[in-house]
Amino acid sequence: MNWLLPPGNSTFAGDIDFIYYVILVITGIAFVIVEFGLLWFVIRYRRRPGRKAYYTHGSMKAEVIWTAIPAVTVVVIGVMSGGVWNQVKGRNAAPADAMVFGLTAKQFEWNATYTGADGRLGTADDFVVRNQLHVPVDQPVLIKLATEDVIHSFFVPNLRVKQDALPGKTIDVWFEATEPGEFEIACAELCGLGHYRMRAFVTVHTADDFARWMAEQTAAAAAGE
Amino acid sequence: MATSAPPIDAVHAGHGHELSFIRKYIFSTDHKIIGVQFLLLSLVGLFLGGMMAMAIRWQLGFPEGSMPLGGIFPETMVSGGVMLPEFYNSLVTMHGTFMVFFAVMPLLVGVFGNYLIPLKIGAEDMAFPRINMWSFWVAVIGTVIMMAGFWVEGGHSQAGWTQYAPLSADPQWTGVATGQQLWLLSIAVLGLSSILGATNYITTVVNLRAPGMTWFRLPLSIWSLFITAILVVLAIPILSGAAIMLFFDQTIGTSFFNATAGGQPILWQHLFWYFGHPEVYILILPAMGMVSEVIANGSRKPIFGYHSMVYAIIAIAFLGWIVWGHHMFQSGMNPTLGMTFMISTMFIAVPSAIKVFNWMGTMWRGNLTLHVPMLNAIAFVAMFVIGGLSGVYMASTPVDIYIHDTYFIVAHIHYVLFGGSLFALFAAITFWYPKMFGRMMSEAWGRVHFALTFVFFNLTFWPMHYLGLQGHMRRIYDPSQYEFLQHLSGTNRFVTISAFLLMVSQVIFAANFILSWFYGKKASENPWNDNGLEWSTPSPPPHGNWPDVPTVYRGPYEFSSPEVEEDFLPQHQKLPGDLEPEAAGRGS
């Protein structure tokens, strides 16, 4: 058991994890002060016969100090967090050159839509692969996230990506994977009976591999029609 | 405006002659009896919620194993000894529902709001005793409706205690129709009970304070219950309204929350959390107030920074109103709002820190009497701090992307609700038990219960932080489905065993509670040498509380005052130099 995060394989994973470790250090200090303070007081000021407690109603100075320090600290954490938030989830956060994919959730599967040769969604040569999202490495990827029934949540722990899919809405999610490999997609929002097994995969290819896979699938899809 | 106006005469007609058993103990209008009725009802709710947690933990710790006592459930819940996923989802839903609505909320607000407010402000009873009686019996009706859901076709609601639409809005997604509707009805009925109780509390605190009980002589428990009551009347109607809308979506084909017919699923989340976040403070503020009483008593010192404590309660309640969106960072809400809700949320750390440091300031240079209530109160502070600090991680929007809806939030809420509220309740129940029942609980068994609960609580919930940081989603029936969760099965098993031991430890509390009622040492009027008005009347107090309403000469925390020999100085005790409230110009 430890407090480290598992490896992150996207461009913004490092920034998210950095904020986490900043908070870990700050809250760690507060934790130690309070818990050991309490423990120390319990030992040091245990009841002794004949002694009276120190009669005081407080101290303005102390109140100001322990109001000001947390206030400044949370503003610092807030401002740091805000920057990373905008970079990951801001309205126009996705890079302009991102490659577009569709991902539609339904009870209990994820259907990835690929653009086919024209590079655009919503055209005749689109094709769908169930529970398999294949993307290239070192290339920003824009996912058009939707759902056919209830709310699901697209969660890829290794990429530090999580976004609810909302009925009636298409939500943009972007990431750029930094390492090839196969990563699990989980559903993070209770969506019914099979919620616990709504599992799929993101396969991150090298650029060459991805081109080859895409060509094969496009051909197969065309042959299928 | 002080007070002495006796509450409604007709209700107190019982003063002169003996009341029948039914009027005295069943349909009672006495706030103390109603408090005890709520106590017994919600301890049953707490037990049921706990047993559901055990079933959930069994499934997570031993997903492939045959469930002990699985045979008592019908095939639609446990089949061939194995819990079914739909039953698991019901259990997750109902564990949350019971713990929030049928255990912690009634324990804090229903029990101690009723019991303490009149006794601590020096009133004979609530302002509206009959409405008070109704608030209890309406809660009983709500409980019966909720329980009925387990026996209907399709089982109980499976949409989580947060009831996110459209999963909750249409039976086709979960296969649950009647159970789901009963859930919503029950919550609407229960809301009525809460509103009846809270309006009563507000009226009583404003109007029925004893002579000399000025606002800044009010005990912090009363301040927190008063502010909580305001939160209740502002928050609960939102939930009731939303529940009724969802009920209509389910039954008569409206589509408030159904996107296919033009509704807005996210509207449910806004309404739910607009109630739900104040609810979080409804579940912690009274705990903070009561812990303040116990810590001052156990430290034999005045509360450090009484005024700061009052302002912190008000600040927490106010901030609690403008932070609901932090539950929805990943919901698809406009991301620009994330920044607003993050900052307002983080600022709650400020009044929370003020409270924690003032509790520590109260203990500093005290003469600490570590009686059982004090041990539980110190545990409250120690555990609430952990829950408060883990909240910062989720308030930070980018970190929340990763840990949202994982076991990290499960750890957080249990550190606040169990480590916080429930330890405060153990402190409060053991502290006021002698006043309620006229007998002392066993101190020795209280210590054993405290020690075991403290240890097993931490062994159960601390590792959940780790599970969450590894990405373990909440509300999943079988984590072994995922490759990236495989290595956590040992931790899950450890948590499960700890949880079982935590539950078993509560047998000691139950036995102590029940046996002390019959065999406990008789309690004196003021067994803890406390200053509050409730300790100036026999244990248990008679109907009407005092022959004559007491007069208040000072604040509630004059421990170790240099003016007297003893280390406490009750609020009603008149010292030679004290003026009568009218003469001092401090009526109320």
Image: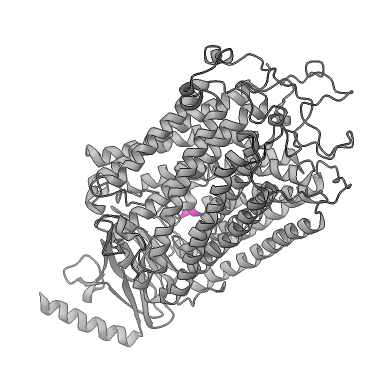
Q: Is residue B390 above or below residue A25?
A: above
- Residues in magenta, as a range: B335-339
Q: Is residue B417 above or below residue A26?
A: above
At a point 84% along the width and 20% down the height, the residue shown is B579
Q: Is residue A29 magenta?
A: no
Quadrant hosting residue B123? top right
At a point 52% along the width and 53% down the height, the residue shown is B507
| Number of numbered markers | 0
- Give the percent coordinates (x, y) of residue B177: 24, 45
In which quadrant of the rendered image does the N terminus of chain B lie?
top right
**Image coloring type:** one colour
> Looking at the image, which is closer to me, A2 or B252?
A2
- Give the percent coordinates (x, y) of residue B10: 52, 12
Asked if one can make out residue B489 in the rendered structure from this viewpoint, the answer is: yes
Quadrant hosting residue B293? top right
Q: Is residue B336 magenta?
A: yes
Give the residue at the far front of this rendering.
Answer: B519
Q: Is residue B101 above or below residue B356?
A: above
- Give the percent coordinates (x, y) of residue B45: 45, 44
> Looking at the image, which is closer to me, B304 or A217?
B304
- Does B468 sit left or right of B173 as displayed? right
- Give the percent coordinates (x, y) of residue B4: 66, 15
> Looking at the image, which is closer to me, B434 or A27?
B434
In which quadrant of the rendered image does the C terminus of chain B lie?
top right
Which secondary structure class fits the magenta region best?
A: helix
Asked if one can make out residue B337 in the rendered structure from this viewpoint, the answer is: no
